[in-house]
Image (cartoon, grey):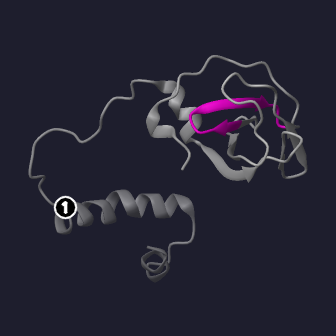
Amino acid sequence: MPQELRLRGIRDRTEANAFLRRRFIPWHNRQLAVKPEQAGTAFVPLVNKAVLDQILCVQSSRVVDNDNTVTYGKRVLQIERSPHRFSFARATVAVREHLDGTLSVWHGLHRIGRYSAEGKKLEAKVLKTTPRMAVP
């Protein structure tokens, strides 16, 4: 596409958008569009909007230190006691950085910590998880 715009002498966004609407999209639909084999849509409704926070994030694997902390960047996240495991020392966890800057630490399907962007502990909020969100 950049080459097409350059060949036509198009240098700014307004001209590029006009070219796309008037010339490129109609050409694309005539030449490259394929009729669907089945009628309908392939999109499915999003039932649980809470999972978006788990999907739209940056996820990194970390190993918990012996003192139940995880280092993420320059922040040290202290993992509190959990009812499903005595200690997380040497366990592999997932640290998720969310769109709002907050962090969460996950062990499998269990969220074991929630932190501010600065790494300070936040109050736990109720979260329903699905098996599809498991950390490998």
Name the element at disc 1. Answer: loop
> Percent from the top left, x then y, of residue 13?
55, 61
Viewed as shown, does residue 89 lie left or right of 27?
A: right
Q: Residues within 10 Å of mark 1 (few under 14, many from 20)?
A: few
Q: Quarter holding the N terminus?
A: bottom left
- In the figure, residue 28 lies in which quadrant? bottom left
Instruction: Give the residues in magenta.
Output: 105-117
126 is higher (above) or lower (below) than 45: above
Viewed as shown, does residue 129 lie left or right of 22?
A: right
> Percent from the top left, x then y, of residue 7?
45, 83
68 is higher (above) or lower (below) than 31: above
Asked if the stretch drawn in magenta spans residue 56, the answer is no
- In the figure, residue 131 lies in which quadrant? top left
Judged by its main secondary structure, the magenta piece is: strand
Viewed as shown, does residue 131 lie left or right of 103?
A: left
Viewed as shown, does residue 47 lie left or right of 57?
A: left
Identify the residue shown where x is 46% and y is 80%: 3
Identify the residue shown where x is 15% and y is 38%: 40
> Percent from the top left, x then y, of residue 85?
70, 30
Q: Nearer the viewer, residue 127 or 13?
A: 127
Looking at the picture, which amino acid does disc 1 mark?
Answer: Ala
Asked if the stretch drawn in magenta spans residue 108, the answer is yes
Q: Which residue is mark 1?
A: 33
Q: Nearer the viewer, residue 85 or 97?
A: 85
Could you tell me how many numbered marks the image carries? 1
Q: Nearer the viewer, residue 130 or 85?
A: 85
- In the figure, residue 68 lies in which quadrant? top right
